[in-house]
Image: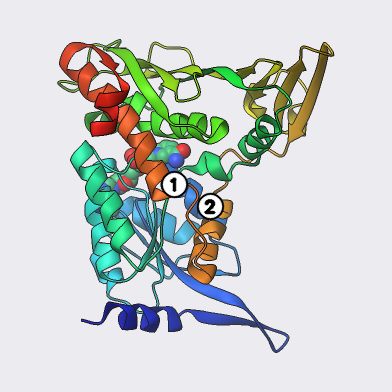
Amino acid sequence: MDLSCTLRTALCRIKYFYKDGEKMRKEYGVVLVGCGHIGRQHIQDIYYKEQIHLIGVVDVDAERAQEFCSMYNADSWSVDYHDYLVRSDVNIVIVATYVNTHLSIVKDCLFNKKHVICEKPIGRTMQEGKEFANLVKASDCKVLVAHVLRHNRTYQKVAEVIQSGIIGNITLIRMVQNHHCKDWDRYKKLLTDCSPIVDCGVHYIDVMQWFTGTPVTKVSGFGSMIDRDLPEGVYNYGMINVQLQNGCIGYYEAGWSRNLASSNLKEFIGVKGRISIILNANRYKDIEEGDLIELYLNESNEYKTINCKSEYKNMWGQMKKLIEMIETNAPAVPTIDEVFSAFRVVMCADSEIRKKGFANIQESELLLK
Ligand SMILES: NC(=O)c1ccc[n+]([C@@H]2O[C@H](COP(=O)([O-])OP(=O)(O)OC[C@H]3O[C@@H](n4cnc5c(N)ncnc54)[C@H](O)[C@@H]3O)[C@@H](O)[C@H]2O)c1
């Protein structure tokens, strides 16, 4: 089969959008697979955009698929995504199911020449993650793994401030993301495939590597079962400590529990000062100003604040990036190598923690995986 020809044919089927007789940007046929928590965030941010034609919504739970179909005005719904993959008017598939299905659904999408936004993480094992990355690299279609913090303006602003050098070289990164889980059944389902330090950790290890511009070279950590009714072999709290190539150290703590309090700490300490991110929802005052970036500069003993429009999950920004990748061949943000690099760090720690309760992985071992 001539794949490049098939791809060209698929791309030609993307309709142009006309306004006042003028040819505008293309309209993309989109299908959402997985009508759960994150599926809703994807769809509610994009379904009304003029470049988007929501062709279908899919969930194995028919009631959910039907609800999404009427709420977001999709053309149709289904419990099986396969039917949509053979349709020529479907250009983009959003995969928002559990991690145990990410690889197989993405494989089916790419085989049928569909572009994809796929939720993280890219697999349940290192092997699955490698297969996912290789598949993406070998495909003519575009795949964006949903590291949504890369498209969040607050995080983009912090990256810009750090990279301007104003707080000097970053020496310490402190990050905590604990969830007090009211919807315990949903979290228990997520825990069967993935521990919190993997599921959320891929975002934050990626942030550490993005902000400092260097890779993680050492990782250690531990995990604990802090609720008693967990699925077998599962831990629901973990902490990982990392060292980056430039000597910066960092930690990331993540737990999903009915007993933990929610906490959210994001702090970046450099030799000339520090930056903290306080999300809009965690501000004590001026909440209408959005997220707050606090900046301290030790040479001038100055405290500064920057308010950023709060867009915790900028799903439209993420979709716009995929469209840019399709139309201009722009690279993915993050690239699949960056996605895999963050995945490898958390998976190395996770596999040791599952075996022994703790992990201590040196550079040489990390690079081998
Ligand atoms: N990027 C982020 O910030 C972020 C946040 C939360 C969750 N996630 C990721 O999103 C994924 C889903 O998490 P969630 O919290 O939305 O879970 P969820 O339980 O709320 O939703 C998952 C949905 O997928 C459906 N589903 C499962 N297998 C399917 C299949 N084969 N075909 C069609 N539908 C199927 C389920 O019925 C469910 O409705 C996970 O990988 C998670 O790590 C990402």
Residue 173 seen in the current view:
yes
Disc with the residue nearer the chain's start (1 vs 2) = 1
User: Which residue occupies 66% across, 34% down?
Assistant: 163
Q: How crowded is mark 2: few (under 14 residues within 10 Å), some or many (20 or more)?
A: many
Q: Which residue is at the far bottom?
A: 21
Question: Which one is nearer the viewer's eye here, 56 or 140?
Answer: 140
Three-letter amino acid code at the position of disc 1: Ala
Question: Where is residue 126 shown, x and y percent of the image?
Answer: 22, 37
User: Which residue occupies 82% across, 11% down?
Assistant: 301
User: Which residue occupies 47% across, 79% down?
Assistant: 14
Q: In this view, does 49 lie to the left or right of 294?
A: left
Q: Is residue 143 above or below residue 50?
A: above
User: Which residue occupies 68% across, 37% down?
Assistant: 160
Q: What's the mark number on residue 228? A: none
Q: What's the mark number on residue 318? A: 2
Three-letter amino acid code at the position of disc 2: Gln
What residue does disc 1 label?
A: 146
